[in-house]
């Protein structure tokens, strides 16, 4: 900073720390956290990753503002992905007569298309956005692989820690009893939570590989096994429990 009296230049401790961090190819702490320690940007272990994230995030948001709403959203590109999905629930709730935001939960479906790469860009892909909810992409599956043919979880290949996950349609559905919300508040027949709990794994989606409630975005049901084989006869456990014990999760970024 410049002294207003004699015009000399002095540097604060924060500037010195930032210069040292850049010299060491680290992300300056002041770029990621405010003085109170609250995150104000994405967390990456390297300066190159942080700068690349800045470019990629600007690209998605700028195209959304300058052009049109994208058919699929790169979830990693949001500083507050929980807030983004909450806004989606509000949008769907307003479309439905008789729905209440307090009685709405997430409903998701895995699509077949995979958008590869770590930058989230969807150029070259022809996608028709869903009538309700949003498409999200850029997620990575850890602890398992995804069968494109059977559309369910399967064992990952040896030494493969992460696999790119297909586009996920995330919408909202009312949990109110049919009599209270009909016709708009009727339960979605596709989503019987008691039945899905037997054949689907309630998979957590995390912002970072650090698995804690702070970085938990939401949970989605992933098909773990067919109804005819919901119990593993060898281990005496349900298929969803197998993947839970394996620590399977979806991540927005791998590092």
Image (cartoon, helix red, strand yellow):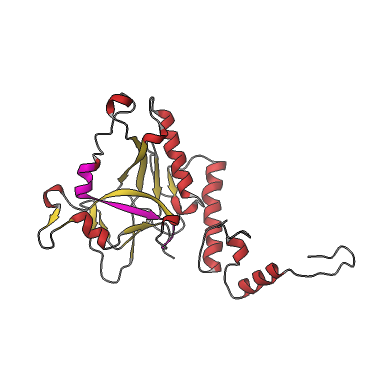
- Does residue 202 belong to the magenta stretch? yes
The magenta segment: 194-209
Between 247 and 31, the residue placed more toward the observer is 247
Residue at the farthest right position = 6
Q: Quadrant of the N terminus?
A: bottom right
Which residue: 24% across, 34% down? 189
Residue 200 rendering spot, x and y as whole percentages:
23, 49
Between 102 and 133, the residue placed more toward the observer is 102
Q: Is residue 237 visible?
A: yes
Residue 243 rendering spot, x and y as whole percentages:
25, 59
The reply, left or right, for residue 130 in relation to residue 146 is right
Which residue: 51% across, 39% down? 68
The reply, left or right, for residue 102 in relation to residue 40 is left
Between 13 and 95, the residue placed more toward the observer is 13
Q: Can residue 131 be seen in this view?
A: no
Residue 109 rendering spot, x and y as whole percentages:
30, 44
In the rendered image, the vertical position of residue 131 relative to residue 127, given as above or below: above
């Amino acid at each position: 900073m410049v002294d207003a009296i004699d015009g000399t230049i002095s540097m604060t401790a924060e500037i010195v720390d930032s210069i040292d961090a850049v010299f060491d190819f680290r992300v300056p702490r002041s770029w990621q956290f405010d003085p109170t320690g609250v995150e104000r940007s994405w967390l990456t272990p390297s300066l190159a990753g942080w700068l690349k994230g800045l470019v990629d995030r600007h690209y998605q948001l700028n195209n959304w503002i300058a052009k049109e709403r994208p058919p699929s959203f790169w979830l990693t590109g949001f500083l507050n992905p929980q807030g983004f999905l909450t806004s989606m629930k509000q949008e769907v709730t307003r479309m439905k007569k008789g729905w209440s935001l307090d009685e709405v939960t997430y409903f998701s479906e895995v699509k077949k298309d995979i958008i590869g790469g770590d930058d989230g860009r969807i150029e070259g892909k022809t996608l028709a956005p869903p009538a309700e909810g949003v498409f999200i992409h850029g997620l990575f599956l850890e602890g398992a692989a995804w069968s494109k043919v059977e559309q369910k979880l399967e064992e990952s290949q040896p030494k493969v820690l992460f696999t790119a996950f297909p586009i996920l349609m995330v919408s909202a559905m009312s949990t109110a009893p049919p009599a209270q919300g009909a016709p708009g508040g009727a339960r979605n027949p596709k989503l019987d939570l008691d039945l899905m709990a037997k054949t689907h794994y309630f998979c957590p989606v995390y912002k970072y590989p650090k698995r804690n409630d702070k970085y938990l975005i939401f949970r989605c049901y992933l098909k773990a096994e067919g109804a005819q084989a919901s119990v593993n006869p060898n281990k005496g456990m349900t298929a969803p429990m197998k993947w839970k014990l394996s620590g399977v999760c979806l991540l927005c970024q791998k590092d």
